[in-house]
Image (cartoon, grey):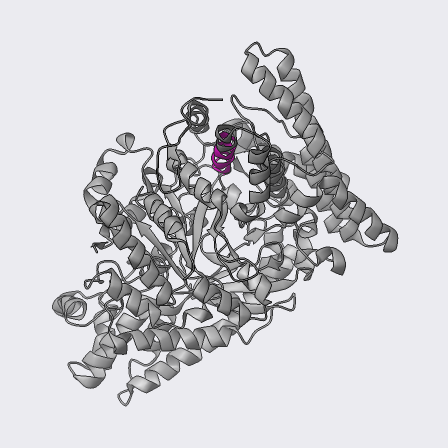
Amino acid sequence: MGTGVINQEKNIANVVVKGNPRIQMMKDHLFKEKRQISLERALLYTESYRQTEGEPTIIRRAKAVAHILTNVEISIRDGELLVGNRTVRPRSGILSPEMDPYWIMKEIDTIGTRPQDQFEFTEADKKIYREELYPYWEKHSMKDFINGELTDEVKTALKDEVFKLNQTDKGQGHIIMDFPGILSRGIDSYIEMLDKKIKETPNNHFYQAGKIVFKAMCDHFIRYAELAECMSRNEKEPQRYQELKIITKMCRKLSTEKPDSFYEALQLLWMTSIVGQYESNASSLSLGRMDQYLYPFYESSLQAGVDQEFLYEVLGDFYIKTNDVVLLRSESSAKCFAGFPTGYTVVLGGLNELGHTSVNPLSFVMLDIYHEILLPQPNLSVRMNELIPRRFLLKTVETIRLGTGIPQLFNDEVCVPAFLSKGVSLDDARDYATVGCVETSIPGKTYGLHDIALFNLLKIMELSMYELREDVDLTYNQLVETIEKKIDYYVELVVKGSNIVDLGHRHYAPTPFLSVLIEDCLENGKDVTEGGARYNFSGVQGIGEANLSDSMYVIKKMIFENEEMSFSQLVDALESNFTGEYVELQQHVIQDFEKFGNDNDELDRIAATLFRHYANELAKYENVRGGQFIPGAYTVSAHIPLGEAVGATPDGRKAQEQLADGGLSPMVGRDHLGPTAVLKSVSKLDNYLTVNGSLLNLKFQPNTLKGQQGLNKFADFLLAFTKLKIQHVQFNVQSKATLLEAQKHPEKYSGLLVRVAGYSAFFVDLNKQIQDDIIARVEHQL
């Protein structure tokens, strides 16, 4: 292995990263070529579907995945220790025309030049798509089903952009498979369990489908074993020859048996993820609590005398491979999820089943190696609680100081009781992890549809204001009541729409492989889309809390208390977009009224009250799987397109300007009393309600974390976050000057990472709107 990988200088985790030639080579290879569309999965999937017409959908899906695993081109890249890639060409975009063939046809000639997340689409592949793939899936896709089922009321709400339905054009992710289960059992064990179930209930298509994919996974491992063996015959470099022989032996073993070593466990973990990707082609097939379920393998490998340097290198290989998977989205979706948030989210630390800290040596190593990787994935998270060891807290701050926005932090003091309030057992609640960006979930037991819809609370205020503009007797309380009634009306509609999308996945995109790896599906004999999982949620994000509370505070003070102007005059000013006679009014409402994020009790209470109403109303509804709807408060990067749907608002925001970023972050530039005031404002929300996840962005000047004193001060700030019972926080630690320079000279800053929303992305990959938003965020100091 490479030399100089681990230096045992004294450090917080006893490991200092000095650079690894293999890891650097793999990083360079990953980004050498431009992103390109791959039709391979779509063609193989379609080929299988042509052969299985008339069979049950779940069997057709299983056979299609098996056909892909049997026929997809495979490769072992230079230097790889772990095998398994979705495509031979790195970072290719994979199409799913079975979900939605229409956006691809519409954007076929612009996908290479669109503002965000471009992919090359060769003319030859365009011809194949137009002549072979599109004609087959037209009028036969999941999108056709969803569009056909949506009611006129739901369609009107979508057109008015009160809410946005997600997951209508791709397979469902935002889930964590039972990785401890497959690592402790191996593939053959699942095939045996499925055989037993099939014998007991021979007509159950779910069991049959699961077996088809697991047997195909076994064969896929054998394909890699044979490829490695073939490559070894021609390999002249002794070290690489030995590596290929080990890969050959390992793949043959894992095709049936459970892993014994850390190396083998990482290989089976990665291949499980890849099979899940072939099945769903979905975002956020997240990885859960890797430091917990991999630690026994890590410890046993060290005890067996395996060089720690080698274990470090294999883990680095795994990290890099998570960046090989990039997701192809439509142009509108790319605006909401800009910068390829793949969702390989990993959680470190937290609590064990006894309620004690679960931080272990691997927790440190997994942060340490990120210091060398410095890529957007895996999306590392650290669970905070009052028991977190100071040493691990300081290692977390060291990693934040790198400036990549990783890791993000979650608060056990909020997340655990929040899950308990939804009927989750104590043991399961203590085991929570994160999926996607900031959504919380119970690993291996939940099908949560965590990102099913975005609900624009500010748009509802706007509709209410225009409806009431001529009411001369209007009171502030009547305005609030109207907003709450509209929330109730549109919540019912977003539930209807979300349930239709849910059914679309059931009828068109069951996931038998994934479902076998979700607890209770085998016992219930049901796919997750049928309600087979132990916990069944649907998550709808309430968007615009900061702008809503800022606007309502201005209305309350300026219109109803100070009586500076009439309500109808204010609506006129908004309709004019603060032009003409209302130019000075915009500065008045921005500068002379407090804003969310500055610890104003009266204002913060408005935010808490309106969000609580939304959350409680949503919680009244049940999804089609018999589970609950749960609220979240995060935007990903959708605060920009959702802002485009809203006219000027009383907080001084002009028409079509962005909303506050993140979800619970103050409006950009309005938090002027420092980071502690921001925390105190957010703490006044009922953070136990955001079971589906919330997001708070904060930006700090790099010198804030300078030296040991800076680390300690920031660590204390994180403990204050924990005690204030806030669910989530994440940080950008980049100077405004650096970001402006990167905007001017992107070629010099290709590796610059920033925190966008619940994920990090390369700054130069983001469109100018999002770049400007990140630049404009207030830089705090402690």
> Residue 324 colored magenta?
yes
Q: 707 or 545, which is in the foreground?
A: 707
Magenta stretch bounds: 313-325
The C terminus, quarter of image: bottom left
> Residue 23 colored magenta?
no
| Residue at 54% from the left image edge and 11% from the top image edge | 237
Q: Is residue 453 visible?
A: yes
Q: Relative to 730, is 429 above or below?
A: below
| Residue at 80% from the left image edge and 45% from the top image edge | 192
Q: Where is residue 351 in the image (x, y as percent from the top left)?
A: 50, 58
Q: 500 or 436, which is in the foreground?
A: 436
Q: 123 or 725, which is in the foreground?
A: 725
Q: 429 or 143, which is in the foreground?
A: 429
User: Does 519 sit left or right of 628 as displayed?
Assistant: right
User: Does 276 sit left or right of 392 as displayed?
Assistant: right
User: Does 324 sit left or right of 642 as displayed?
Assistant: right
Q: Position of residue 75 (x, y in %)?
A: 59, 24
Q: Relative to 604, is 226 above or below?
A: above
| Quadrant housing residue 575 | bottom left
| Residue at 27% from the left image edge and 64% from the top image edge | 678
Q: Can residue 377 be seen in this view?
A: no
Q: Where is residue 561 in the image (x, y as percent from the top left)?
A: 20, 85
Q: Position of residue 176 (x, y in %)?
A: 58, 51
| Quadrant housing residue 471 | bottom left
Q: Is the magenta stretch mostly helix, strand or loop?
A: helix
Q: Relative to 669, is 153 above or below?
A: below
User: Does 340 sit left or right of 603 as displayed?
Assistant: right
